[in-house]
Image (cartoon, rainbow, N blue to C red):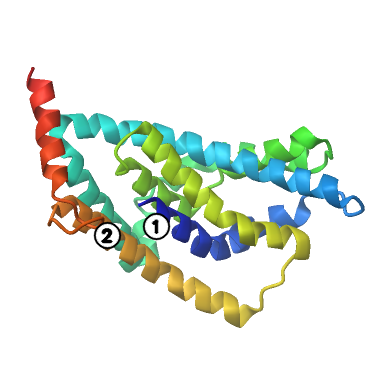
């Protein structure tokens, strides 16, 4: 599933450029010193990956707790269904239940902190900008978080989110160097492809939970793992 997280991040980065692109465009990188600029951008990405990894560990841990109660396969199926519903349901319906309205004050504080850091040019400010950037609300990050819950554990969830973040690096880095370089037609084509890929990932999670005995896609040993977990709890 790590490969799907990487591809998810790669495709999703086109959406990221639209949502977080302004931050990448405004990074106070040193345009006259190529080496310093690389280190600054690297620091920015490390900050983002740390945030994604931390979020993945927390939600992966939550998924593992549920797994210990014998819900491993059910979690994978539910996550897959939620991914698909998030795409096919009208945005107005989904927005009523996504809980983001309760985060507005907190997000406002994050944006204020980002604004302050963007005015600085020290190396640590780039790390902080990336770290804060990772906390900004993003539908694709939410989808990746779903994947981390079903990853099987805290470290697995963290890796899932890190691989998602790694997938976003190439395009976000290009945006930092070249600015708004993508033409509108190309962006629209990619944005149309993202929901399709999310649905494919959702289907993969459902198949994984069904344990149909398909190697790498729907391994039947998930049933055995769940039984071992149940027996462990009983003893």
In the orientation shown, which residue stands out farthest toward the bottom? Answer: 185
Side of 53 relative to 187 (left or right) = left
Contact, mark 1 vs mark 2 (Cβ under 8 Å)? yes
Observer able to see residue 29: no
- Cα separation, mark 1 vs mark 2, equals 9 Å
Reading the image, the residue beneath label 1 is 4
**Residue 179 coordinates in the image, percent (x, y):** 75, 65
**Residue 89 coordinates in the image, percent (x, y):** 31, 65
In the orientation shown, which residue stands out farthest toward the right? Answer: 32
Seen at 47% across and 55% down, the residue is 6
Seen at 63% across and 62% down, the residue is 171
Categorize mark 1 by other alpha carbons within 10 Å: few (<14), some (14-19), many (20+): many
Q: Classify the position of the C terminus by image quarter.
A: top left
Reading the image, the residue beneath label 2 is 204
Mark 1 or 2 closer to N-term?
1
95 vs 146, nearest the viewer: 146
Q: Place residue 16 in its image quadrant.
A: bottom right
Q: Place residue 87 in its image quadrant.
A: bottom left
Residue 209 numbered tag: none
**Residue 102 coordinates in the image, percent (x, y):** 45, 41
The secondary structure type at the circle numbered 1 is helix
Looking at the image, residue 81 lies above or below residue 120: below
**Residue 165 coordinates in the image, percent (x, y):** 53, 49
Observer able to see residue 82: yes
Seen at 29% across and 62% down, the residue is 84
Seen at 39% across and 64% down, the residue is 91
Q: How many marks?
A: 2
């Amino acid at each position: 599933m790590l490969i799907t997280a990487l591809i998810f991040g790669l495709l999703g980065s086109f959406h990221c450029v639209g949502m977080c692109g302004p931050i990448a465009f405004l990074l106070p990188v040193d345009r006259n010193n190529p080496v310093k600029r690389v280190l600054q951008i690297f620091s920015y990405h490390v900050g983002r990956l740390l945030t994604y990894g931390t979020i993945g560990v927390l939600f992966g841990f939550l998924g593992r707790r549920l797994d210990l109660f014998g819900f491993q396969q059910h979690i994978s199926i539910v996550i897959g269904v939620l991914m698909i519903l998030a795409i096919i349901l009208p945005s107005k319906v989904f927005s009523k239940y996504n809980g983001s309205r309760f985060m507005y004050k907190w997000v406002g504080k994050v944006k204020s902190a980002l604004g302050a850091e963007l005015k600085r040019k020290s190396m640590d400010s780039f790390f902080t900008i990336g770290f804060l950037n990772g906390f900004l609300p993003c539908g694709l990050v939410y989808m990746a978080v779903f994947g981390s819950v079903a990853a099987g554990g805290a470290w697995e969830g963290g890796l899932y989110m890190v691989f998602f973040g790694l997938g976003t690096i190439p395009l976000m880095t290009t945006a930092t160097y070249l600015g708004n370089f993508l033409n509108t037609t190309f962006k629209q084509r990619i944005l149309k492809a993202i929901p399709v890929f999310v649905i494919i990932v959702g289907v993969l999670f459902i198949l994984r939970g069904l344990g149909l005995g398909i190697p790498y896609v729907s391994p039947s040993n998930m049933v055995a793992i769940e039984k071992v977990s149940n027996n462990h709890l009983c003893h």
